[in-house]
Image: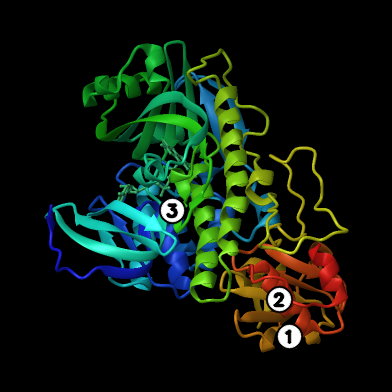
């Protein structure tokens, strides 16, 4: 490594370590918020293995807000493959069971954009292209971060070119550790991972073969193959020529990762297809171990863990990448607010308070999904997934944050559901995702979700002009105000009930689409009320407020 002491350090507000989906999305969110960041990725390019494919509706909402939805859908698999998953004795053999996904119609009642099946090796180049366009010169592939030091004032370390070995020092106020499940930053922080390790060992074989004649009559996103001496899964990539085949619990069959030569992989894939005469080209083989573990803290001073660095979960349920992207969204607006001087440091503590509980929940759900299918190290004769599998609406949409970054209501409760995994009841109680409702704006059909994602938004009832004026008067942070019925039209008349406010009430939505505060009725001084709730949400201490506000904040 050549370190030139004369080299001036790179100085950047936020260093993002890792150019996987979560690091790339963090870069996009920070750029959207007007914050300069530098992303370093030790590999020279994005992922070569497909890995994740299920980009859930909540994540698609975020990519819709970032303007990437059309590009991602264009690379995604045909919709007919998204309708179900099935279990069979072989790809060409008898079917054991099929399970349908949430229908598009049902999904569109909850969100303006349904889940998309787009393989990670196709998604990442899209994210990279958009991130580079939004921050030219601020993404460096083939550069490793090392020798991290950090303290109250920020972080420093070295950025080492993977090819030449040339090292450049850096200084940053914050570091986002998006460095994946083997995170060296996490190790350095001394953060422990809590949960169940080594749930199963697995090999992922990425291959090219024309499987059309076995899948065309029963298109599915996943084909679970159940044979006494081989339990594996075909992952649909494009539904015709590009696939992955996953063998779970390889040690159960006495295999080691090094046994998976290209020839051996082809044999296994042919056995799972149930046909010996199939042309197969192996494109890549990756061994990995599924664990269900979550970091015991997501923040250490100026360093934040996001994505797989913060939580590792079995892919059963397709929640890993999605949870990570949503971490990035939660953290980015908070970093931006603090860097701009609009928020106090305690806002950054709310990242751990909000995201770690959810990380633990999604990890537990993913583990239960995996265990129910009996393909883990604790092998069992179970075949079919548990009931909640593929119906995780509650996990995706229904989680409610409880932190200092919102103003809780003393007298109302979010809807209580019997099963928080599968059930979602839309609610605008503070801490919930602001629900989707269709509106008309300038003759165009838009979702409430389309109004969010660029700073704070205040939605006011039809007689809420005072709130609109209060939003316009608010400078740091800026708040965009909309009066329903004037600026946007409540197309199907559902907004008011869904958001639980009267004609003079208002709802404040955070930049990540989470309800920060709401008032069902008018208040005496809307401008004072709004600045008071913003101060509370942003951790700037309690600002003198109306009586109603003081009550709401306790
Ligand atoms: C078979 C399989 C199927 C899956 N299916 C799904 C699914 O359907 N849906 C879903 O949501 N999730 C799924 N997942 C999980 C998903 O792949 C991961 O959650 C996701 O890749 C995590 O993204 P990340 O950006 O946090 O980490 P990673 O993708 O691991 O990226 C971390 C990056 O950091 C880089 N890095 C590490 N250290 C340094 C350093 N010091 N300096 C610079 N760069 C560094 C690494 O090179 C790497 O590129 C699946 C996983 C597998 C294995």
From the viewer's perspective, tell me whether residue 373 is left or right of residue 288. Answer: right
Say what secondary structure mark 1 lies in. helix
CB-based contact (under 8 Å), mark 1 and mark 2: yes
Q: Can residue 421 be seen in this view?
A: yes
Where's the C terminus, which quadrant?
bottom right
Q: Determine whether 421 is above or below 122 in the image.
A: above
Q: Which mark is residue 227?
A: none
Residue denoted by label 2: 458
Q: In which quarter of the image is residue 154?
A: bottom left
Q: As rendered, which of 232 and 457 lies closer to the eye?
A: 457
Instruction: Indicate the position of residue 419 as horizontal and vertical percent values.
Output: 75, 38
Distance, label 1 to label 2, CA atoms, is 9 Å
| Residue receiving disc 1 | 470
Q: Which residue is drawn at 43% across and 41% down?
A: 190
Determine the CA span between mark 1 and mark 3: 36 Å
- The residue singled out by tag 3 in the image is 22
Indicate the quadrant of ligand 1 in the picture: top left
For disc 3, does the CB lie below 8 Å from ligand 1? yes
- From the viewer's side, name the closer residue of 169 and 521: 169
Residue 439 at least partly seen: no
Residue neighbourhood size for the residue with mark 2, other residues' Cα within 10 Å, grouped as few (<14), some (14–19), many (≥20): many
- State yes or no: discs 2 and 3 in contact (Cβ < 8 Å): no
Question: 31 or 213, which lies in front?
Answer: 31
Please tell me which of labels 1 and 2 falls first in the chain.
2
At numbered mark 2, what does the secondary structure look like: helix, strand or loop?
Answer: strand
Q: Where is residue 249 in the image (x, y as percent from the top left)?
A: 42, 20
Circle nearer the N terminus (1, 3): 3
Of callouts 2 and 3, which one flags the residue occurring earlier in the amino acid sequence?
3
CA neighbours of label 3 inside 10 A, class few (<14), some (14 to 19), many (20+): many
């Amino acid at each position: 490594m050549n370190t030139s002491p004369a080299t001036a350090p790179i100085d950047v507000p936020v260093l993002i370590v890792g150019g996987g989906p979560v690091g790339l999305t963090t870069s996009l969110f920070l750029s959207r918020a007007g914050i300069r960041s530098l992303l370093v990725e030790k590999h020279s390019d994005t992922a070569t293995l497909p890995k994740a494919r299920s980009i859930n509706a909540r994540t698609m909402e975020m990519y819709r807000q970032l303007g990437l939805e059309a590009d991602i859908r264009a690379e995604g698999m045909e919709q007919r493959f998204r309708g179900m998953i099935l279990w069979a004795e072989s790809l060409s053999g008898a079917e054991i069971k099929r399970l349908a996904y949430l229908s598009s119609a049902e999904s569109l009642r909850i969100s303006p954009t349904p889940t998309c099946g787009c393989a990670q090796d196709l998604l990442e180049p899209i994210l990279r292209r958009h991130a580079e366009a939004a921050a030219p010169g601020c993404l460096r592939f083939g550069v490793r971060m090392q020798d991290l030091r950090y303290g109250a004032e920020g972080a420093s370390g070295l950025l080492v070119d993977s090819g030449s070995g040339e090292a450049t020092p850096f200084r940053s106020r914050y570091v986002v550790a998006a460095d994946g499940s083997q995170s060296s930053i996490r190790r350095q922080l001394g953060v422990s991972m809590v949960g169940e390790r080594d749930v199963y060992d697995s090999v992922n074989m990425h291959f090219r073969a024309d499987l059309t004649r076995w899948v065309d009559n029963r298109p599915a996103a996943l084909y679970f193959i159940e044979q006494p001496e081989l339990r594996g899964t075909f992952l649909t990539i494009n539904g015709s020529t590009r696939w992955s085949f996953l063998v779970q619990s390889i040690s159960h069959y006495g295999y080691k990762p090094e046994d998976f030569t290209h020839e051996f992989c082809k044999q296994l894939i042919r056995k799972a297809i149930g046909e010996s005469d199939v042309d197969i080209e192996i494109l890549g083989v990756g061994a990995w171990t599924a664990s269900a573990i979550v970091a015991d803290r997501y923040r250490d001073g100026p360093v934040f863990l996001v994505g797989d660095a913060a939580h590792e979960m079995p892919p059963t349920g397709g929640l890993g990448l999605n949870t990570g992207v949503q971490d990035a969204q939660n953290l980015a607006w908070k970093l931006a607010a603090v860097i701009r001087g609009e928020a106090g440091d305690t806002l950054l503590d709310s990242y751990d308070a909000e995201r770690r509980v959810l990380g633990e929940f999604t990890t537990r759900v993913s583990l239960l999904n995996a265990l129910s299918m009996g393909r883990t190290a604790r092998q069992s004769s179970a075949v079919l997934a548990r009931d909640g599998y593929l119906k995780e609406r509650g996990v995706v949409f229904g989680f409610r944050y409880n932190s200092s970054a919102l103003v809780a209501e003393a007298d109302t409760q979010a809807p209580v559901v019997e099963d928080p995994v599968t059930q979602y009841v839309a609610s605008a109680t503070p801490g919930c995702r602001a629900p989707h409702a269709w509106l008309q704006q300038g003759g165009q059909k838009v979702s409430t979700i389309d109004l969010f994602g660029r700073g704070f938004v205040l939605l006011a009832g039809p007689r809420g002009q005072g709130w609109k004026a209060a939003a316009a008067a608010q400078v740091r942070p800026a708040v965009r105000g909309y009066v329903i019925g004037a600026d946007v039209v409540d197309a199907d008349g559902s907004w008011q009930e869904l958001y639980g406010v009267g004609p003079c009430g208002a709802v404040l939505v955070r930049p990540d689409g989470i309800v920060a505060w709401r008032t069902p009725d008018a208040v005496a001084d809307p401008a004072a009320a709004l600045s008071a709730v913003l101060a509370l949400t942003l951790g700037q201490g309690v600002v003198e407020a109306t009586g109603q506000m003081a009550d709401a904040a306790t």
